[in-house]
Amino acid sequence: MRISFFILLFFAGCISFAQGVKYRCKVYSVVDGLSQSSVYSVFQDSQGFIWAGTADGLNRFDGYSFKVFRHTFSNESSPPDNNIRQINEINDSLLIFSTDLGYCIYNRRNGNFNTNPYETPQPKKLYSKKIFIKDKTVWIYYNYSNVLRKFDTENDADILEKKLSPVNGEYYYRPQSM
């Protein structure tokens, strides 16, 4: 009986403590400066900025306002496309993101975009690339051709290009070491 009382007292304290926690949430929209209401990806970088990939550009939020980066035809260092699909961080100064027309690296130190730095020129659209980063190595999967490429960002070198073959409708790559 005494143990039951202490267990009941413990759970009552936990429940009352949990109910005391309040969270604030603010919804941002185009009225607040977001470039478009269709957000494909959201990423928080190591500096605390929130990045949002939309159908109308790359948005950086500092907690107060949005800065929007869009493709500009006259500017070769702008993003290759406004449909920002995926955002990731290579290191504290470089962000990488994918678009419908390729991927791009944004250098936060100088504010420049480098479009498809490891890409071999191809006339095709590059739909839905997936980007993975591990130990300063960038892995990019191109689903239009089922190719997996690996790049060493420190040495600016293409390490691997592997055409993946389906196994029961799924694509796998098992490296000896990553």
Image (spheres, helix red, strand yellow):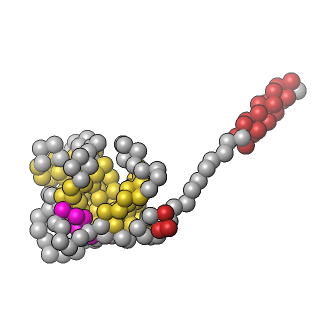
Res. 53 image quadrant: bottom left
Residue in the picture at 26% in, 69% down: 71
Left or right: 34 in relation to 139: right
Q: Which residues are the magenta region?
A: 77-81
Res. 21 image quadrant: top right
- Does the magenta-highlighted stretch encompass residue 80? yes
Res. 135 image quadrant: top left
Return the x and y of residue 8 as percentages of the image width and height. 81, 33
Is residue 143 something one can see in this rendering?
Answer: no
Q: Quick one: quadrant of the C terminus?
A: top left
Residue reaching furthest to the top: 2
State the predominant SS element of the stretch in magenta.
Answer: loop
Residue in the picture at 14% in, 57% down: 118
The correct choice, above or below, for 45 with respect to 54 in the image is above
Is residue 38 something one can see in this rendering?
Answer: yes
Q: Closest to the observer: 51 or 17?
A: 51
The correct choice, above or below, for 178 with respect to 74 in the image is above
Residue in the picture at 23% in, 46% down: 109
Residue in the picture at 73% in, 43% down: 19
Q: Closest to the observer: 69 or 51?
A: 69
Return the x and y of residue 157 as percentages of the image width and height. 11, 49
Q: Quick one: quadrant of the N terminus?
A: top right
Q: Closest to the observer: 157 or 81?
A: 81
Return the x and y of residue 156 as percentages of the image width and height. 12, 48
Left or right: 160 in relation to 21: left
Q: Closest to the observer: 76 or 103?
A: 76
